[in-house]
Amino acid sequence: MSNGHSFREAPQSLFDSDEAPIMPQPGGGKPPSYIADHRQRLRERFMAGGAAAMPDYELLELVLFRAIPRRDVKPLARHLLEAFGDFNRVLTAPRERLAQIKGVGDAVITDLKVVEAAAHRMARSRVLQKHVISSWDAILDYCHTTMAHRETEQFRVLYLDRKNTLIADEEQAKGTVDHVPVYPREVAKRALELNASALILVHNHPSGDPTPSQADIDMTAQVQAACTALGLVLHDHLIIGKSRELSFRAERYL
């Protein structure tokens, strides 16, 4: 039905819709054209081949384009990678650490954290309300995505119902680079509140080595004792390292 108005969708670039235009620099000089050309080439390569076609620093450049529209961002991308190690560690770096890098302001930090949050949410959507056994690879992928590149320890609990469907994933505590406080009774109490029947413990080792410490082993035994007293099942305790994980069940700690 026509009402006298014509609505037409204007062609838009996936990336350019809200990026500020490259503006003339002080003194009347124009920014060098290679900046715009370089950005266009990277975008075209990304659209043609995806992330697999790009090294970490170029993928990071694509993220930085939106926050820094009028400047060559390659030096900053390389500086961030030198400071934190790889693309994933840049995304998961604490805000205060990012802010210490010259050239990183609120806009850059916000865009990095949006990308991190999107990755976590996508990985989480693949495991919540799914059967644990049939979704085990997705669960491991989720744990690695959210925890493997953190600079400090984090302790999470995956709560399952009687059919071993994942009904909740909750962060219980954060800690230092080599310690996180865990309260076994609180873990078991929360399971009862959620009407869960079983649980999986997960925490990361920022060192990258998932070998359990004696403190990890003792804490797991305490959680298992609390679960047994309340009729709950502790399926496993996963320690997430940088490139691999360790299962207490597979290694016969449980």
Image (cartoon, rainbow, N blue to C red):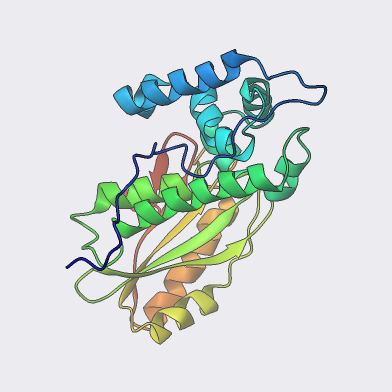
Task: Left or right? Give the position of 21 relative to 47.
Answer: right
Q: Is residue 252 visible?
A: no
Q: Nearer the viewer, residue 218 or 84?
A: 84
Q: Residue at x 44, y 34 (%)?
A: 243
Determine whether, in the image, residue 101 is placed left or right of residue 242.
right
Q: Residue 67, relative to residue 158: is it above or below? A: above
- The answer to which quarter of the image holds residue 29 is top right
Name, please, the residue furthest toward the front.
4
From the top left corner, tell me how far across and down residue 70 is, in percent. Answer: 65, 29
**Up-down relation of residue 138 to residue 158 (above or below):** above
Say which residue appears at 64% left-offset and 42% top-offset.
108
Query: Quick one: quadrant of the N terminus?
Result: bottom left
Q: Position of residue 151 (x, y in %)?
A: 63, 44
Compared with 19, 203 (above or below) is below
Can the viewer see residue 154? Answer: yes
Rendered image quadrant of residue 49: top left
Residue under the point 30% across and 23% down: 48
Question: What percent of the width, then of the height, locates residue 184?
Answer: 53, 73
